[in-house]
Structure formats: C-alpha cells, structure tokens
Amino acid sequence: MWLYNGKLVEEKTSWVDEHGTRHPPNWNSVWSDADKINAGMKEVADVAKPSETFYKDIIRNEDGTYSSTERGLEELKTEYFASTKSAARSRLAVSDWQIIAKTEREREIDEATTTYRKAVRSACDAIETKISSCNSLDEFKALFVTPEDGKAPIHDWPKLEE
C-alpha cells in the first residue's frame, strides 16, 4: 500500500497532493514504483484487517492501520457454545429419522450411524470443554488455528461415512 504524507492513498481513487494537483484514479496502475516515490509517496506493507470473529468496531485509520476493540471473552464463549450445539444438532439431524424409526417401529439402527452419532456428541463435549478452558482471548484464538495435520480445535467434528 502507498502513503502520501503519512496517509493511505486508496487504489482506484483520485487524490490531491500538497501542491493541489489532482491525480487520476488509475495512478497505481499507470505509475511505476519510481514515479510513486518521486511523487512523494512511500510504500509500506499492508496491515491485515483484524478478524471480525474476535474484534468489533474495526476502523481503517488514515495511515492504513486499523483500530478495533476486542470482543469480550465471555461473549465469545457464549456465542461459540451456541454455535457448537447448533453444529452438533445439524450433524445429528441427518440420522434422526433412524432414531425415530427405532423408537416408533423398533427398526434397527446400523452400527455406522450409532458410531457417528456418538462421535458427534463426544466432539461437541470436547469442543465445549476447550471453549470453557479458555482464560484469555489469545487462548480462544488458538482454537481457530488449523494444524498441518488436522482441523482447528473449534471445528474438530467427525466425518460422516456414507
């Protein structure tokens, strides 16, 4: 990203320099890096926008950085307890008809379904335990990190075998 006098100059947006010269919206695509530097611009690394999962009131500052407010840990825990339960319900709903058929007509449930449903309930309990054990936002954020050989702990659900 490019700054002019310490302020972010958005691509595809015209801008006025300190001499009153208006530059066209295509400045970024037609100027070389040398042209930009000669115009008094400075290239800086773009800053990643904070995740809306963990932050609120996210505002892009004039210098291209962001200001934000951390979401409360208890608010996040409550939200993700609810979404974890909802995810478990959705996964179990696929085979609920078999449970109903067993109850109403004494129909047998195949072992794969029984195993999967047990794994879903176990995964839900494990995810809720991980959420509960978080004592800081950083610990909570770690639940979303995907290791090379697996799934992020917050999304560690069994796969439905068909």
Image (spheres, grey):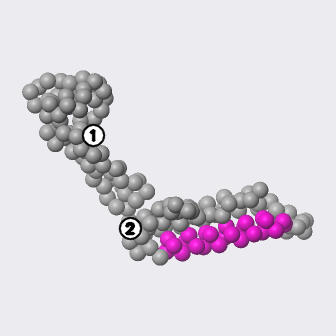
Which residue ends up furthest to the left in the rendered image? Answer: 19
Crowding at dot 1, Cα within 10 Å, few <14 / some 14-19 / many 20+, comes out as some
Work out whether mark 2 precedes mark 1 in sequence or the reverse, and give the earlier one. 1
Residue plotted at (79% across, 65% down)? 112
Q: Which residue is mark 2?
A: 138
Report the quarter where the C terminus lies.
bottom right
Crowding at dot 2, Cα within 10 Å, few <14 / some 14-19 / many 20+, comes out as few
Question: x and y percent of residue 122 in the render?
Answer: 65, 72
Does residue 77 appear left or right of residue 95 in this picture? left
Residue plotted at (47% across, 62% down)? 145
Helix, strand or loop at label 2? It is helix
Q: Amino acid at mark 2?
A: Asp
Closer-to-camera residue (113/35):
35
Q: Is residue 62 above or below residue 105?
A: above
Residue stretch in magenta: 109-132
Closer-to-camera residue (30/152):
30
Instruction: Confirm whether residue 25 shows in the render.
Output: no
Q: Which residue is mark 1?
A: 1
Helix, strand or loop at label 1? It is loop
Residue plotted at (28% across, 50% down)? 66
Q: Are marks 2 and 1 in contact (CB under 8 Å)?
A: no
Q: Is residue 84 above or below residue 22?
A: below
Task: Based on the picture, tell me whether residue 78 belongs to the magenta stretch.
Answer: no
Which of the two marks, 2 or 1, is nearer to us in this view? 1
Q: Amino acid at mark 1?
A: Met
Task: Based on the picture, tell me whether residue 111 belongs to the magenta stretch.
Answer: yes
Q: Quadrant of residue 51?
A: bottom left
